[in-house]
Amino acid sequence: MQITREEVLEYHLGGKIGLRLTKRLTGVDDLCRAYTPGVAIPVKEIAADRSCLNRYTAKQNLVAVVTDGTAILGLGDLGAEASIPVMEGKAVLFKAFGDVDGWPVPLNCCRKDGKNTGPTDPQRVIDCVCAMAPMYGGINLEDIAAPACFEIEERLDAMLDIPVFHDDQWGTAVITLAGVINYAQLADRKLASLRVVVNGAGAAGMRITEMLKAAGCRDIVLCDSKGVISRDRPGLAGKKLEHAADTKARTVGEAMRGANVFVGVSVANCIKADDVRGMAALPAIFAMANPDPEIRPEVVVEAMKGKPYVMATGRSDYPNQVNNVLGFPFLFRGALDAGASTINLAMKQAAAAALAALARAPVPDEVKTIYNAPDLEFSSGYVIPKPFDRRLFVEASFAVAKAAIDSGVAKPRDLAAYRRELEARNRDRLSAR
């Protein structure tokens, strides 16, 4: 897949999103209903009963895509304004895949110096998000650097009665868990028996570690730029101390000896062929640094010399792409539809399980055609479903909503009817393409 700089810039001319009216405005009567004097009626209804808010406004399907621009993709701290193309892109994906109305909210003046440089001030971000929250049914935090992102998400989630989700922390974790579940199926192993190495102790690496532990993985070694985060390493604090391992390994290569799974959310080309050769039989290598992975698939092919393995990256030009678009549109779709007050661990685990199950199911001809893969089926080259598999809208969204209800963060509803509703909406979306 080759795209030029000029093609990308032309695609972005004028931005990628705009306003879509959901009601007609074709005459005087419509004008009176949409604005004065008619609009006073829903205003009074909401003022008298806050539960009417979702019913009479766009709030129930509107998500704020919030950033301060301190950790844009793999580009780093480039500021709120430079983040806007990414936030618009996120809004495009919300709508195209989950039928969720996302809107970019880039925040200036949320730095500790009160200007637009320096580290994030968590309190400023929290204050801004709380002030604007009445309009939104959910908050998607994006491209906010660690460690501030942890505090911001945790505090906002506790303070607000709507879902708050930091995709850089949890999105990759959900997709990775789905891939590891299916790797375990192929290897005929229990998650509890896997030896896992996670390289990268930022937002994504921490949450991947937590998701894998919650799913049953017991033996996980976390590494950062200084090497293995072991219990006897001095100066550890916070989440690094929480996830420190009891091991004599000091480098990521040493930690990988005999490991079943390598998960990379770090930097390009930091893993060598010998590191892969030192892993257990049928290893899984999730090398997800973007745009260049920790080890290129071609190097792994050469290192394995015909032996079986599973390889995943963050790129669309290789099999098994770990793409967050498999997660956040459907996590919010299910959460919004259920009226959930949060996106909790049970909902994230349910999304991962639904993704894993979908990859094991027979692949529709439409998906095979889109990806020019007539033989696509569950295998080492296909442990993660494809983003354009339209069944995701139903399967992942339903799993999330059910988990929200089952875990008590949403009110009970007729789940069979909800599934039929999702299926009908999916048919309508497909016929409208």
Image (tube, rainbow, N blue to C red):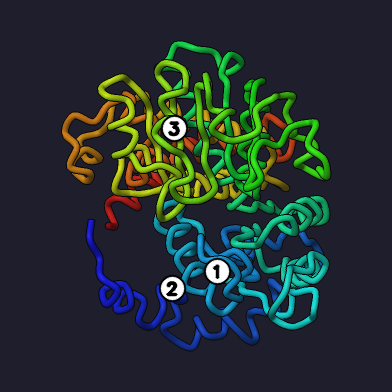
Image marks 1 and 2: residues in contact by CB distance under 8 Å:
yes
Residue type at numbered disc 1: Trp
N-terminal label among 2 and 3: 2
The circle on residue 103 is 1
Category of crowding for the residue at label 1, using alpha-carbon neighbours closer than 10 angstroms: few (below 14), some (14–19), many (at least 20) = many
Comparing 309 with 345, the one in front is 309
The secondary element bearing badge 2 is classed as loop
Residue type at numbered disc 3: Ile
Residue 402 visible here: no
Determine which residue is flagged by label 2.
17
Residue type at numbered disc 2: Ile
Q: Quadrant of the N terminus?
A: bottom left
Determine which residue is flagged by label 3.
285
Image marks 2 and 3: residues in contact by CB distance under 8 Å:
no
Real-space Cα separation, disc 3 to disc 1, in angstroms: 35 Å
Q: Quadrant of the C terminus?
A: bottom left
Image point 82% across, 51% down: which residue? 158
Residue 395 visible here: yes
Res 56 quadrant in image: bottom right
Comparing 214 with 63, the one in front is 214
In the rendered image, the vertical position of residue 93 relative to residue 297, given as above or below: below
Q: Position of residue 153 (x, y in %)?
A: 73, 54
N-terminal label among 3 and 1: 1
Category of crowding for the residue at label 2, using alpha-carbon neighbours closer than 10 angstroms: few (below 14), some (14–19), many (at least 20) = some
